[in-house]
Amino acid sequence: MSISYWNSAQTKKNIETDFLIVGGGIAGLSSAYWLEKNYPTSKITLIERHKIGSGASGRNAGFVTCGSSEHFAKLVKDFGTEKAVEIWQFSEQNRELLKTEIIKDNSSKVLYSSTGSCTVAASDADYNRYIELANTMSGLGIAVELIDENRIKSDYAVKGFKGGIEYKHDGEVHPVLLLNELRGQLKRTEVIEDQEVCKVESNQGVHCQTQHLSIRSQKALVTLNGYLGLLWPSWEKIVRPQRGQVIVTEPLPKKVKGPCYLTKHLCYFRQMPKGELLIGGFRNLDLEKENTFTDQVSQTIQNALFDFTRNFFDFTKDAKIKNQWSGIMGFTSDGQMVIGESPELKDVHLMAGCSGHGMGLSFHAAKVLVESLAGGRIPAHLNVSRFSI
């Protein structure tokens, strides 16, 4: 964002802080949480350009998952089996950290449910491939079960699919309630909303400017995910924005057990506690237009989502749409996050490129980022140093 002379505040409020966090989503709030734990006497300031949860963290499907079984197969292809297991376990640790640190013994406050998740097979060829994939994952200690067409119908109420792979430990959550709970557990973080950062400079500390604020900090944590390229355009080639679109129906009979993936259409769905059916995905129908910072829905993808809702379930013939929305994700070329100190700005640390897995990665990733400030190790597949600007 740039600021015109006419809109610029003639007198800006000056803020001195130890740690500045830019971005008020799951990544930013999680960073504040771990900073408070690791630096108990420090002053922390978090800046959000709109309201907490206005970005992707308040616009996703609420999957607290490791990803689909197809995702695991791709990890094996791209990184090898040992690294794939490490990456999968990172998400498992994210889920367990959220449960022990934030959700604790009261899952109802964030509508968290440990449901498991399922990757459904769209064809006989997919199902035959899943037989081998399920055996591989089980042999590596991942708690999966191959389920047949009858189980797909009874547990997930979808028709026309041959079966799937069910992973036992995933869950689902109300993402905004989770953000609110995270914020509520912060004790020493000043949260400032409705202030968009327009400039971050590094010179004997970090200097950050918004329209009304001038902030100096020892270190800055920039947690903008897909919007990183709006602050620094050179980063858009590393973290590409991509829009995801979602619809939610009016309440229906409760029939879908937990989060599901249909990777053929980059599609995912779940059913909420009161019966609303959520369907997202189909961005591969129009990828060029979905590579955008623009937050709006498109008719092509919304039609595909509605057609899937009406035609692929056994209880949605008269389903009515309650909500439609979109959100901007950030994708890297290898599908893994970017964590670490900016190669261009000293004392400015980045966390971005969740690649569609923000809820399944960010709490643990924030812990890694904060620990790295004191020399902690960042896994090689997440380290910012693997890219050059």
Image: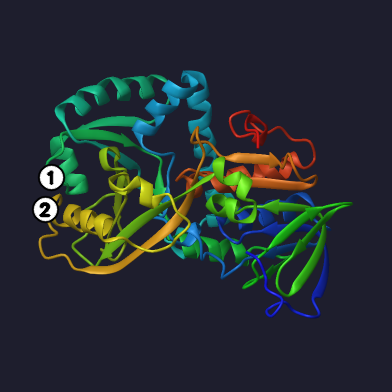
Q: Looking at the image, which residue is at 56% across and 46% down?
A: 236
Q: Where residue 300 sits in the image (x, y, percent)?
A: 25, 56
Q: Looking at the image, which residue is at 62% across and 66% down?
A: 48
Q: Where residue 84 sits in the image (x, y, percent)?
A: 48, 25
Image quadrant in which you'd find residue 186:
bottom right
Report the residue that reaches farthest toward the front. Answer: 5
Q: Nearer the viewer, residue 309 or 166?
A: 309
Question: Given contact means CB atoms under 8 Å apart, are the residues at marks 1 and 2 in contact?
Answer: yes
Q: Amino acid at mark 1?
A: Lys
Quadrant of the rendering where the C terminus is positioned: top right
- On the question of residue 151 being in view, the answer is yes
How many numbered discs? 2
| Disc 1 element | loop
Q: Nearer the viewer, residue 212 or 126?
A: 212
| Disc 2 element | loop
Q: Amino acid at mark 2?
A: Asp
Instruction: Specify the label residue 138 is tagged with.
Output: none
Asked whether, in this view, residue 239 is left or right of residue 208, the answer is: left
Asked whether, in this view, residue 319 is left or right of residue 378, the answer is: left
* Residue beneath disc 2: 314
Colouring used for the render: rainbow
Spatial CA distance of label 1 from label 2 is: 7 Å
Q: Looking at the image, which residue is at 64% across and 63% down?
A: 185
Q: Looking at the image, which residue is at 70% across and 52% down?
A: 221
